[in-house]
Amino acid sequence: MDESAGAPAEPDGTDRPATGATAASGARAAVRRRRIGVLLTVALLAYLIDLGSKLLVVARLEGRQPIQVIGDVMTFQVIRNPGAAFGMGQAMTVVFTAIAAAVIVVIWRIARRLYSLPWAIALGLLLGGALGNLTDRLFRAPGVFRGHVVDFISVQHFAVFNLADSAIVCGGILVVLLSFRGSNPDGSVHQPGRGKDETAGTD
């Protein structure tokens, strides 16, 4: 006779580990959704601010004398830029359009494993800035993929740029700082001198 047949079963003996794993997985999924929400919110704000500023300066300033903001140090003047940020590579408009599109795809792929709040903000800035300048490439003259970006912030002895460029630079600096800290998009932190990442929560 099988003696175990009459033994009482352990309460939740087999369900507790599975339930715990499911709860942990659900919690991480919720964190990822919130981080993606932050990324998209930051990107949308950066994009709308850039787009609004360009529409405003084109309507009010294009073809007119520069407006002094801080003496001769900073002025507002509209310049159509066929190149990259800060006027670089003006003969490679189509190439920079393709690069901007590729950056957007890469950011979206990273977002699938995004659990870090600082990384969400950094990627949101990069995404919003890239979308802002890509919009110019696609919809402004002289044509699709060859459109000139509207730049209007002129800093003496530096360059003429726009708010999308500023968002890209700020996002890039934040990415560098996070990487220097050892922070990863998935919320883990790489400890220098160790062979693997050490999970440090979700920032």
Image (spheres, rainbow, N blue to C red):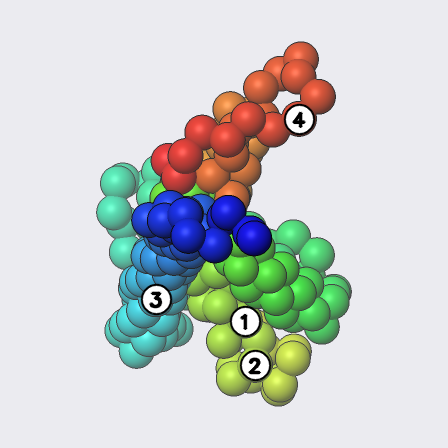
Q: CA distance from mark 2 to mark 4?
A: 43 Å
Residue 44's label in the rendered image is 3
Q: Looking at the image, which residue is at 58% across and 19% down?
A: 191
Q: Quarter of the image for the C terminus: give it.
A: top left
- Contact between marks 1 and 4 (CB within 8 A): the answer is no
Q: How dense is the environment of label 4, judged by Cα within 10 Å: few (below 14), some, or many (20 and up)? A: few
Q: Which residue is mark 4?
A: 196
Q: Are marks 2 and 3 in contact (CB under 8 Å)?
A: no
How many numbered marks have been drawn onto this rendered protein structure? 4
Question: Which mark's residue is nearer the viewer, 1 or 3?
Answer: 3
Q: CA distance from mark 1 to mark 4?
A: 37 Å
User: Helix, strand or loop at disc 4?
Assistant: loop
**Front-most of 141 and 72?**
141
> With 66 as the anchor, is 194 left or right in this view?
right
Mark 2 and mark 1 in contact? Answer it, CB < 8 Å.
yes
Q: Which numbered circle lies on residue 134?
A: 1
Up/down of 146 relative to 131, above or below: below
Amino acid type of the residue that numbered disc 2 sits on in the rendered structure = Leu
